[in-house]
């Protein structure tokens, strides 16, 4: 007679492993269609992440935190608050390829005015 109890224990352990492993990854929760780029360089030191989706909604996140919605007029004050905590911060701009160029320029102007380092995110 074959005992199935050890097989079910193994299946539950594998299931638990895959559930735990999938929650540790932090995918981009906001669906943004990034433009293509030929350059393959990446940055490792991103502190603040600004995302703009295809509807023009702004989102911000610090490090690996969950993105939260923010009004465009509140973005400058939010980024300045982060910059006061860490003057060597980077801002990663994740902007959908279909948004108006003025939204990208708005974020670039804020970064330039306050001497923040900014990185534009693209697809590989």
Image: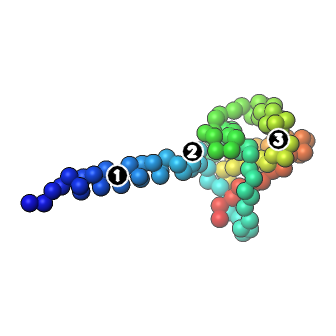
Who is closer to the viewer here, 103 or 67? 67
Identify the residue at image location x=74%, y=65%: 41
Among the two numbered marks 1 and 3 on one chain, the one whose residue lies closer to the N terminus? 1
**Residue 85 percent coordinates (x, y):** 81, 36
Dot 1: few (<14), some (14–19), or many (≥20) neighbours within 10 Å?
few
How far apart in space, not on screen, are marks 2 and 3 (Cα)? 25 Å
**Residue 75 percent coordinates (x, y):** 77, 35
Query: On the image, numbered disc 3 is attached to which residue?
Result: 86
The label on residue 13 is 1
Query: On the image, numbered disc 2 is attached to which residue?
Result: 29
Secondary structure beneath dot 1 equals helix
Among the two numbered marks 1 and 2 on one chain, the one whose residue lies closer to the N terminus? 1
Secondary structure beneath dot 2 equals loop
- Seen in the picture, residue 81 relative to 116 is either above or below; the reply is above
Q: Quadrant of residue 113?
A: top right
Query: If the image is split into quadrants, where does the C terminus sit?
Result: bottom right
Who is closer to the viewer here, 6 or 111? 6
Dot 2: few (<14), some (14–19), or many (≥20) neighbours within 10 Å?
few
Among the two numbered marks 2 and 3 on one chain, the one whose residue lies closer to the N terminus? 2
């Amino acid at each position: 007679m074959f005992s199935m109890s050890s097989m079910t224990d193994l299946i539950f352990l594998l299931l638990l492993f895959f559930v735990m492993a999938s929650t540790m990854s932090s995918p981009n929760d906001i669906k943004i269609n990034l433009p293509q780029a030929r350059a393959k360089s990446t940055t490792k030191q991103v502190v603040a992440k600004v995302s703009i989706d295809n509807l023009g909604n702004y989102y911000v996140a610090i490090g690996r935190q969950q993105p939260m919605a923010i009004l465009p007029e509140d973005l400058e004050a939010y980024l300045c608050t982060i910059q006061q905590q860490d003057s060597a911060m980077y801002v990663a701009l994740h902007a959908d390829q279909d948004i108006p160029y003025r939204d990208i320029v708005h974020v670039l102007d804020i970064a330039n005015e306050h001497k923040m380092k900014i990185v534009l995110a693209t697809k590989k």
